[in-house]
Amino acid sequence: MIDYFELQYVLTNRKIKEARINPFLGYVLGLTAFVLLSEYIFHKTEFAKYLVILTCLSLQLKLSEKNRTDFLLSTFGDITKMKIRIIENFIFCIPFVSILIYKSFFFEASILFLSSSILALVSFHTSINFTIPTPFSKSPFEFSTGFRKTVFLMPVAYALTVIAINVDNLNLGIFAFLLVFLTSLSYYHKPEQEYYVWIFAETPKRFLKNKVFNAIRNASILVAPIVISLLIFYPNEFELILLFFIIGLLFLCTIILAKYSAYPGEMNIPEGILIAFSLYFPPLLLANIPFFYSKSINKLKYLLND
């Protein structure tokens, strides 16, 4: 079991070094970005504690994927696998629990710790045996496949909108459509195989334009019921609602361009740091978008024709 965690530590350091960053500095920068982002979220919304819990549990769900837990079971046996999963979830939840305790949300911190412990004991299938219809075409595969994996979050977001209107809480409504945007961002986390880029008979500029346009269109479809409802019941807050909607779209564009700026590899620490600081100071998006766009063009030239 110790060898497993030593291997994970070595692999993590290797990824940091591939980004040309000293591992120690990478951990410090990551922790700093996490603290600053947490402070920003707690400063901006009263529902930050729920967002912290949701983010932590969503990360831990990936660790409970059945293929992964089956591998641990076949390699280490049942008892050791259970110990590994509990320790992994404990490591993941430490920063989030620490933030909640620091903000004096002791009950929520206890719930998160307990939920993390329970989640370590179960596993989930990330694939399903039937097809869920989506409002998207097959060509922007990110939304078609991503929506089917996260479809359960959409009723939650829409229900939060109804609750927000009933209790006259605009902040909860804004949190609801930001939840949809956050879910949409997750669709672009993993790079696709190079073949699925090469098959497009387009220039890099045209390819990126279509990717961004499709993402904006599809995200708008998902968030439209929430935004329209909020505009109907809070017409005086039109500018605020529109501002958050635009910021959500800008973050979506940033994630797409950041993905292809590192292509065919995965987004690494440099991209993560820039995105994290953009969350803390959204006007940075206006600088990050052209920066990632330029890098994406260069990365895609070897697969797509100019």
Image (cartoon, grey):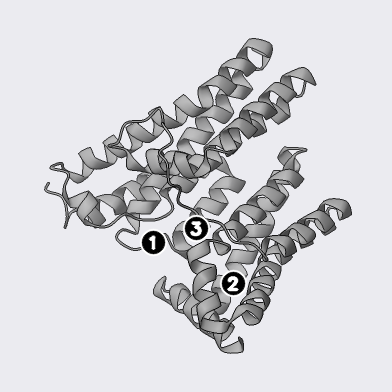
Counting labels gives 3
* Residue 3, image quadrant: bottom right
> Of the residues shown, which amino acid type is indicated by label 3?
Gly
Query: Can you say whether 273 is above or below 243 in the image?
Result: below
> Of the residues shown, which amino acid type is indicated by label 1?
Glu
Q: Is residue 150 left or right of residue 306?
A: right
Q: Which mark is residue 266?
A: 1
Which comes before the other along the chain, label 3 or label 2? 2
Instruction: Name the element at disc 2.
Output: helix
Q: Is residue 300 left or right of residue 23?
A: left
Q: Nearer the viewer, mark 1 or mark 3?
A: 1
Quadrant holding the N terminus: bottom right
> Of the residues shown, which amino acid type is indicated by label 2?
Tyr
Residue lying farthest to the bottom in this orientation? 3
Dot 2, how many residues are within 10 Å of its Cα: few (below 14), some (14-19), or many (20+)? Answer: some
x and y percentages locating residue 298 in the rendered image = 23, 55
Residue name at image x 73 percent, y 19 percent:
165
Instruction: Name the element at disc 3.
Output: helix
Give yes or no for contact between labels 1 and 2 (Cβ–Cβ under 8 Å): no
Query: Can you say whether 167 is above or below 98 in the image?
Result: above
In space, the residues marked 1 and 2 are separated at their CA atoms by 18 Å
Residue in the foreground of this view, choosing between 306 and 232: 232
In space, the residues marked 3 and 2 are separated at their CA atoms by 12 Å
- Name the residue beneath numbered marker 2: 27
- Name the residue beneath numbered marker 3: 272
Q: Is residue 136 left or right of residue 96?
A: left
Residue in the foreground of this view, choosing between 292 and 249: 249
x and y percentages locating residue 137 in the rendered image = 32, 31
Dot 3, how many residues are within 10 Å of its Cα: few (below 14), some (14-19), or many (20+)? Answer: some
Instruction: Name the element at disc 1.
Output: loop
